[in-house]
Amino acid sequence: MRERTLRNPSKVITMIWPGTGDPYKKKKAIRFLAISFGIGAVAVIAVSMGVNPFILEQPRHACINDLETDWKIAFTVEIIVDNVEAPIPANIGIKDECQRAIYTLSDDGTVYAEWTENPEFEIGHFMWIFEIPLRDMDQDKSTIYVNGKESPHFTKHPLQDGLHYKIVLTSKDYDTSKDKDFLPELEN
């Protein structure tokens, strides 16, 4: 029996943990914990083996270093957050010897996309790889322009070769904190 003794200046209190006083309840509690642990372990293994390979095979997650890419496009991107132009650095999408399907090579705003066939990339995929925290932005006040015209699709606008995408974002707290920076940190 597992007990805990609490010392009080006036008296000693003995506390029995739930499920450990009665041998029947103790056995039942241990059985419940063992079954719960088993179900959790099976769930973790199933997700690791079943779902993760499919996630890594998706074009936005996969490394293209060893792939024969037949579909290639280049486009330009300009990002404005809270009326301030954000720099687009070189090597977006290139990390630890893994080149993603959407990447930059220089800091001039030119973005490249490659894959084995047309994966139907959207501008939101570039924003995801660039790690723009869209959840911190007011989507009612934000917009995306494609070749100077406002896109009705916002982040779902398809990427096309030779087009210019201007992403204009307004943070949720822009009115109260105009100096707060919501852009991802740039690696040197």
Image (cartoon, rainbow, N blue to C red):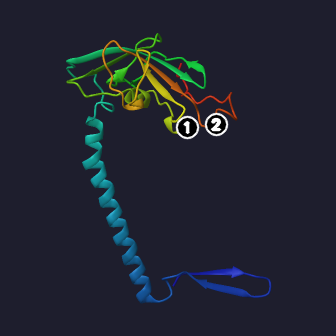
Q: Residues within 10 Å of mark 1 (few under 14, many from 20)?
A: few
- The residues tagged by marks 2 and 1 sit, at their Cα atoms, a distance apart of 8 Å
Give the camera-side residue of 137 and 127: 137
Q: Residue furthest right?
A: 9
Mark 2, residue position? 173
Among the 4 quarters of the image, the one containing residue 77 = top left
**Relative to 116, does residue 108 appear above or below in the rendering?**
above
Residue 87, how many percent across, how many down?
53, 17
Give the camera-side residue of 156 and 133: 156
Mark 1, residue position? 136
**Relative to 141, does residue 38 appear above or below in the rendering?**
below
Residue 161, how many percent across, how many down?
30, 15
Q: Please report the residue visible at 55 percent of the width from the left and 26 percent of the height from the top.
A: 185
Q: Are marks 2 and 1 in contact (CB under 8 Å)?
A: yes
Q: Residues within 10 Å of mark 2 (few under 14, many from 20)?
A: few
Residue 174, how many percent across, how many down?
64, 32
Q: Amino acid at mark 2?
A: Asp
Residue 158, how many percent across, how many down?
32, 26
Among the 4 quarters of the image, the one containing residue 137 = top right
Q: Please report the residue visible at 30 percent of the width from the left and 40 percent of the height from the top.
A: 55
Left or right of residue 142: residue 83: right
Q: Please report the residue visible at 45 percent of the width from the left and 15 percent of the height from the top.
A: 90
